[in-house]
């Protein structure tokens, strides 16, 4: 009986500690995304950190990328004269700042990471990708501004969050 209990205790401690500090090499994470070199550059400085630390770091990068992108969109709106361009940039602005838009979803992703709900983290990261794709792939306007690159950075960094959530999930 004593053996049985200590076995369970050791088992429990192993499971909880492996969840708390699971480490996956950056190259294994980055081979799963569309642009592995973007991912490696992004995570390089955090190599060796556990998955949760990487996820927190990437969320912070995406938040900063989104803020820069929103500033850029506002500049483009202020300087655009064609109606097509204006309606495209306004669509993109909505995608980021609307209630339920990408910035809003990112704060949910932040909250569920803290709660350990990696399933919802995955859903949120996917929602953000859909939002940003609606801006980048707007069929009504051929955008030649730097917004495509800026929104593309958000998309690629968000894909890293999505991939980290699948590693965190597979660990449960
Ligand atoms: C997004 O963040 C990465 C990493 O900090 C940076 O290299 C890139 O320039 C940023 N892009 C934008 C649009 O802020």
Image (spheres, rainbow, N blue to C red):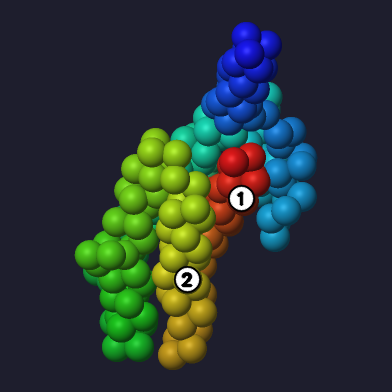
Q: Quadrant of the N terminus?
A: top right
Query: Is 43 placed above or below 65 here?
Result: above
Q: Quadrant of the C terminus?
A: top right
State the residue position of label 1.
166
Residue 118: give x, y in percent of width and height.
49, 47
Which is nearer the eye, 120 or 89? 120
> What residue appears at the point 62 percent right and 21 percent down from the top-left corner?
8
State the SS at label 2.
helix
Residue at image point 35% right, 57% down: 105
Residue lying at 32% horizontally and 48% vertically, measured from the top left = 107
Left or right relative to 18: residue 79: left
Residue 78 visible in the shown view: yes
Q: Looking at the image, which is closer to me, 58 or 171? A: 171
| Residue denoted by label 2 | 130
The number of callouts visible is 2
| Residue 145 pos. (x, y %) | 47, 70
Is any part of residue 132 visible from this angle? no
């Amino acid at each position: 009986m004593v053996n049985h209990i200590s076995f369970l205790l050791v088992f429990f401690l192993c499971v909880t500690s492996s969840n708390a500090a699971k480490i996956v090499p950056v190259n294994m994470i980055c081979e799963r995304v569309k642009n592995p070199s973007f991912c490696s550059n992004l995570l390089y400085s955090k190599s060796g950190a556990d998955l949760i630390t990487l996820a927190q770091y990437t969320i912070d990068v995406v938040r900063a990328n989104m803020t820069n992108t929103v500033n850029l969109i506002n500049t483009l709106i202020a300087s655009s004269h064609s109606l097509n361009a204006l309606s495209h940039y306004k669509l993109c602005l909505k995608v980021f700042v609307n209630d339920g838009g990408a910035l809003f979803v990112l704060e949910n992703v932040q909250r569920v990471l803290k709660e350990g709900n990696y399933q919802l983290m995955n859903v949120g990261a996917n929602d953000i990708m859909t939002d940003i794709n609606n801006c980048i792939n707007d069929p009504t306007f051929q955008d030649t501004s730097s917004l495509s690159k800026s929104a593309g950075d958000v998309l690629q960094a968000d894909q890293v969050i999505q991939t980290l959530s699948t590693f965190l999930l597979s660990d449960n």
